Amino acid sequence: MINKVMDYKNRVLAIFKPKIFCISFQRTGTTSVGVFFKEHGYAVGSYGVSKKNDWTLSWFKGDYEKIFNSFDFKTNQVFEDDPWWCLSFYKVLFHRFPKAKFILLERDSDKWYDSMVNHSNGKILGNTYRHSKTYRRENEFYDANFNVDKLYSRDIDNLLLLTEDQREHYKNLYELRIREVKEFFNQFGSDRLFTSSLENPKKWNELGAFVGIKVAADYEVHANNTAARK
């Protein structure tokens, strides 16, 4: 009962507080970021909340206001996983919410790709059409003659493979995207972005300092969420 009351209180307060977006690529500690904030009393819109609201599909359609006007968006303060990391959506969020803060965790690109491969047993994560657009594999998608009648669907179909042949392609995209994010914030608002390596043992303490909360010196969290992703 106490937890439900606290959750309700946090969600009401979230309406009036600046948003915090984790824009780390998938398989880069996004779920752990959500757990960190939940354990420190924040209302968190995690993957399950995004899935319930079809936020990633709305992002893909370009219907951003449908996301921002939803009840769960208004009553949560912290957001992790998709669609927040997708392509250049962080630029929309940056301007739409001028008081918002952003979190970018990064890891070794080979370890990141290994995690991608292991997540779905060598298949791409989530919806194939969106994945092909995000990771620039459109030609493979169209050449395979997949069903184009359901391009803008919420289906998780995992129709393409992740193999060693794609490793360098994915690594290059991953490293380039991190560079682009850092360049953007360095130009327009470096004080609004927190960056750290996923391997940094003090990352949670440093993140706490960034958002203004006290974190126990020995605090640690690692949430390896292997649920299917859009």
Image: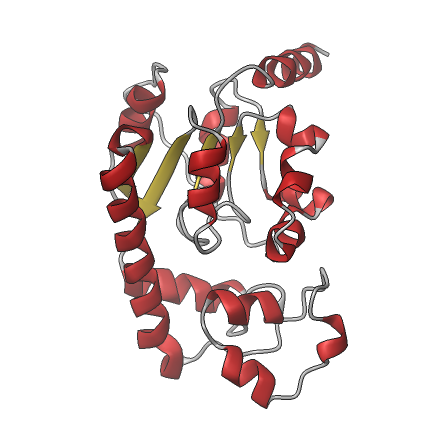
The percent coordinates of residue 7 (x first, y second) are 64, 17
Residue appearing at x 58%, y 65% in the figure:
130
Residue appearing at x 60%, y 18% in the figure:
15
| Foreground residue among 217 and 110 | 110
Residue 107 seen anywhere in this rendered image of the structure:
no
Where residue 202 sits, quadrant-wise, is: top left
**As drawn, 18 above or below 153:** above
| Foreground residue among 29 and 170 | 170
Residue appearing at x 48%, y 77% in the figure:
137
The percent coordinates of residue 22 (x first, y second) are 44, 39
Residue appearing at x 44%, y 35% in the figure:
95
**As drawn, 191 above or below 195:** above
The quadrant of the image that shows the N terminus is top right
The quadrant of the image that shows the C terminus is bottom right
Outermost residue, right side:
149
Residue 72 seen anywhere in this rendered image of the structure:
yes
**As drawn, 190 above or below 92:** above
Position of 209 with respect to 30 (left or right) is: left
